[in-house]
Amino acid sequence: MPLPEGTIPVGIGLLVAGLASFAFLRVGKNALGSDEAFSPVLSLWFATFALAPGFFLPLEQELGRAISARRALGQGARPVVRKVVLLGIALAAIVITIIIAASPWISQSYFGGDWVMLVALIIAFASYMPVQLARGIASGHGRFRAYAIVMGADGAIRVLLCIALAIVGVNTVGPYGMAVALAPLAGFFYVYARGQLRTEDGPPATWQEVTPNLGWLLLGSVFAAGLVNAGPVAATLMADESQKEFVTQFGYAVLLSRIPLFLFQAVQAALLPRLARLAARNEFDEFRSGFRKLMIIVLAVGAAGILGSFVLGPFVIEKMYDVDISRRTLAMLALGSAGYMIALALAQAVIALKGHALVGVGWGLGMVAFVVVTWLSSDELFRRIEFGLVASSVAALIAFAIALRHKLRTGSVPTSESAMEAIINMPFES
């Protein structure tokens, strides 16, 4: 079948973002000279992606859905955008206030007393608010090239800034932290300057139009984004001074285990828009058939990721980052990643069936499982985190499987709006 609209540009954006992630870490580590020196930058990286997508992705989802609905009616979307911008500013202000209030503890416990990195975290979080809203505007209007530019420019500019800092001989972590913080804005300003975020005026927007599922989407997104970054964040908080270098190496292993998730994004870009069209046309037999095929692909990608991590993982990570990570660690991280990927696919199906509340609860159960298992399972730092990541994915997966069965038994059917929310429900970034 022909590729759905936007598949190629979004796929290119995903590819650039994914490759840039690995390049940034390699260049940054070489520039700063050691894993221990690079540790604060990697900690900032994971903290940013635990917070920003978690809080701002629901705004992107609701904005894209509302704009798409207005386009179908021939109505301008500017009033909707204004409403969501106000929500974004309010949400960013609340979270930043909490970060500032907890800044002494965050700076000391997470960044080893480095206040510059704390400032970088605040700037990075604030930067992603306009970026995610720009993506919502682009997706809602079908401007997928602009969407891909915003997504890919983040990683590309980050690498270029890092290379420039390395060339001029910068060997302190602060400037590299600021590169992480400011890079997302490059793509936003580029598409804004080209008029690709322009919207037309239209009928006044009500809060109900832009927030019907925002609360549950926000709850689920915060927990889901937190879980995918929970391993490195927990390792940073729990490690003693002698383990800082190993925490950085553990972060490299976590990123390597995300390769199946990266492939999953590409699969979604190709398949889920077609599922949305089937839902909109009430072709539910074909919808179920397409979803079953998606799940088969997800299982295959997850199994390949686990096997590849066990067989080739140590060789790949040694060549990429010059570190020695055991097969057990890499296989366990890949298992947790595969479980998360399956859970995410099931969660998207539940959202498509208008089960937003069930998804929020499911990701919450996953977070509880991570905390409990990490706390009680072992005395060895990385092993207990590995167990926690696997347990969290399994808990969420089971919750979503039960929720999906319930929604199907009760006769729930997807709508075009709920299917679109499911399509862009990807609460993690590369």
Image (cartoon, rainbow, N blue to C red):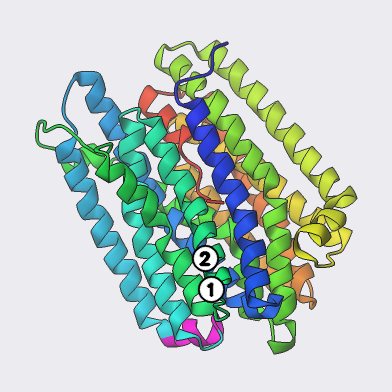
Magenta-highlighted stretch: main secondary structure? helix
Q: Residue furthest front?
A: 168
Q: Quadrant of the N terminus?
A: top right
Q: Is residue 105 magenta?
A: yes
The residue that mark 1 highlights is 168
Label 2: element kind: helix
Q: Position of residue 79 (x, y in %)?
A: 14, 39
Residue 40: within the magenta?
no
- Residue 392's image quarter? bottom right
Task: Give whichever of 155, 52 is nearer the camera.
Answer: 155
| Part of the protein shown in magenta | 104-111
**Element at label 1:** loop
Q: Is residue 216 visible?
A: no
Q: Nearer the viewer, residue 145 or 393?
A: 145
Indicate the position of residue 359 as horizontal and vertical percent values: 49, 44
Left or right: where 40 falls relative to 201:
right
Crowd rating for badge 1 (residues with CA inside 10 Å; few <14, some 14–19, many 20+): few
- Mark carried by residue 372: none
Q: Which residue is mark 2?
A: 164
- The residue at 32%/32% (across/down) is 140
At x 19%, y 39%, the residue is 80
Classify residue 100 by image quadrant: bottom left
Q: Which residue is at a point 44% across and 17% down the rendered structure image? A: 277
| Label 2 close to label 1 by CB (< 8 Å) | yes
User: What is the crowding at mark 2: few (fewer than 14 residues within 10 Å), some, or many (at least 20)?
Assistant: few
Question: Is residue 300 positioned above or below 228 on the image?
Answer: above
Q: Position of residue 194 (x, y in %)?
A: 27, 39
State the residue at coordinates (47%, 55%): 157
